Amino acid sequence: MVQFILERANYWAIIGLMMVGLYITFQSANMIKRLVGLSIFQTSVFLFYITLGKVAGGSAPILFGRDAKGHGAKVDHSADPGTHGTEVAHAETHGLIEIYSNPLPHVLILTAIVVGVATLAVGLALVVRIRESYGSIESDEVRRMDIGVADAQDADALVEATS
Amino acid sequence: MLETIISALPDMMVANAAPLLVVVPLMLAGICVFVPNGRAAWVLTILGSIISLLCALTLLLQVGAQGVVSYHLGGFAPPLGIEFRVDGLNILFLLLVTCIGVLAAIFSWPTVEAEIRAEKHRLFYAAHLICFTGLSGVAITGDAFNLFVFLEISSISTYVLVALGGTRDRRAFPAAFNYLMMGTIGATFFVIGVGFLYAATGTLNMVDMAERLALIDADNRAVVAGFAFIVVGLGVKAAMWPLHQWLPNAYAYAPSFVTMFLSATATKVAIYALVRFGFTVFAPEYTFEALNVALIFGPLAMIAMLACSFQAVFQTDVRRMLAYSSVAQVGYMLLGIAIGTSAGLSAGLFHLVNHALMKGALFMAVAGVVLTYQGTRITDFAGLGRAAPLTMTAFAIAGLSLIGMPLTAGFQSKWYLLQAMLDAGWGIAAVVIVASSFLAVIYMGRVLQAVFFQAPVNPRKQRREAPLLLLVPLWILTLATLYIGVQADWIIDLVQAAAQASFVPEGVL
């Protein structure tokens, strides 16, 4: 049981962060807090992708050691007979000796981080404008003010129509 | 005639039409920031839209000739490299986005000049071009993660564009903020879904993904979870009921031009992505037999058609009314998609094209009213039939098309949808289509009654048409609506080709 939980520690962290983020996003009335929640939610997805790319025992996806020497040329595997057992068998299918994590999710997440930063920046800029024009960053107060204005306009329209 | 126009284009442009369609507006967006004034930015925007339209027309010919146009970005062959892939399905959306883009760009200047502060004109057009880039990018790309990036490029600029309505009405700021929260959650859900699919298949290229998913067991939980996340994520972007809460406020308080452009393109492109994933990436057998998505989409679509039409009836603001009507119309499209037959899909796509034309025309006419009379409540529209006959006649024709009057485009696609429903044995859906159209009669009828049969409330309202720059695109859209209403064969051919292309991706499987 403990092993079951610990083996999947990353995934538990992802689920936890995701739920925390979504909860803050939906529950909080404060717009800054809602943006914080959104960022936590997005971060959980970054962690999810990075976890997908991790290969057990793999290092950062930069050629090193014996792979670096053979860079660009076919690596001769016969010179290194089976000292690493199954790991070598796995690496051989990719023509590499060392084991590397999958670099693609890292690159994808770099892009997603940029998107997240841009979204957060636009969101914060909007909060600034809301603060300037409403004097509040609590969404329920803002909504109350809007409803008040709408009611006043309807009353005006009624007066205009009857006169 | 099309061939002669295309043959006049430089060879470089014909050969690279796919990337140019996306890259030209993106580059012009950057240039827009540095031009001396807003009018120059406007000219650049029209120029960029027209070049994109020419690229889309080139692609239309190429797709007609060779079936699928595939462009490998950076020379890296798919599935490893990113691919721009145009087939019968997305050429429809590229044409839609670029045509609307050109008309919207031409019409934009008078309303932008009136509603946006002068020092922001250049930035406004830059944001619009980026939004345009994102939308056409979503429609053209063949890579699942690239689709997310383009989706966010368009969405982030959309939040900015909606918020620019705040100089006129401060309610645009909270509307844009809520749109941002919902939109980002939707996009993030989409990324989670793509992550699951990447974990299951090890590829991001959509055609490659389709091939590998076909080999995976239908009960695979990662695939099911991926499907669910993608559908919900794109559902938010497409304003699928009940995920549409962001839409009415965003449409009601955005600048008129933005409302017009978004209503005709943004949700449509999200529906394209939904169709692409539901039919091409996941085989229709998987979507409709293993998961039985029809049982989820069908009822949701029907509720949207009834509930949102009903809400539209009680709106006092014309733009809010049209926004609720948009959500209801998304229901029609999803209903067509939900039955999972080729006839249903083409009916849904047909209605999608028609809805883009008529909602575009309606919001353009409303923009004209905002421009000349500064009001969007139904009472503000009273008596305008006499004051601005050209604008209001176009408004009325588009409105009748929304209801589904014979001889208009709306009738053609609703009729087509009705037949598809009856063929598939969905009798209740046919009843809902008719009932929702009756509700449309009520809400459009309220406005049209005010426009044509009420005396103007405010006697200061004299005879004032919208400017010519606005009337020309408005009437092009309106005449297109009428033309499709009479002569729909060519567009039915186009949507049927689109439906076929989404069922069996050519060259694979």
Image (cartoon, coloured by chain):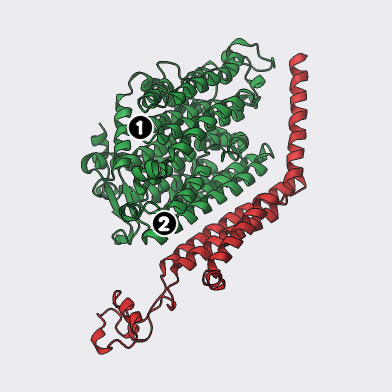
Residue that badge 2 annotates: B197
The numbered mark at residue B18 is: none
Residue at (40, 78) in percent of width and height: A62
Which residue of the protein is positioned furthest toward the front in this rendering? A1
| Image coords of residue A133 (percent x, y) | 73, 44
| Image coords of residue B265 (percent x, y) | 46, 38
| Image coords of residue B189 (percent x, y) | 52, 52
Rendered view: A68 above or below B346? below
C-alpha separation, residue under disc 1 versus residue under disc 2 = 27 Å
The answer to whether residue B218 of the structure is visible from this angle is: yes
Q: Are marks 1 and 2 in contact (CB under 8 Å)?
A: no
Label 2 residue SS: helix
Which residue of the protein is positioned furthest toward the left in this rendering? B65
Residue that badge 1 annotates: B346
Amino acid marked by disc 2: Leu
The answer to whether residue B384 of the structure is visible from this angle is: no
Q: In which quarter of the image is residue A92?
A: bottom left
| Label total for image | 2
Residue at (46, 21) in percent of width and height: B401
**In-front residue for pair A140/B163:** A140
> Do circles 1 and 2 both sit on a common chain?
yes
Eye-nearest disc, 1 or 2 = 2
Is B420 on the left-hand or right-hand side of B465?
A: left
Q: Which chain is disc 2 placed on? A: B
Give the colour chain A carries in the figure: red
Rendered view: B354 above or below B459? below
Chain identifier, colour green: B
Mark 1 crowd level (few <14, some 14–19, many ≥20, 10 Å Cα):
many
| Image coords of residue A163 (percent x, y) | 78, 14
Label 1 residue SS: helix
Residue at (32, 20) in percent of width and height: B487
**In-front residue for pair B193/B10:** B193
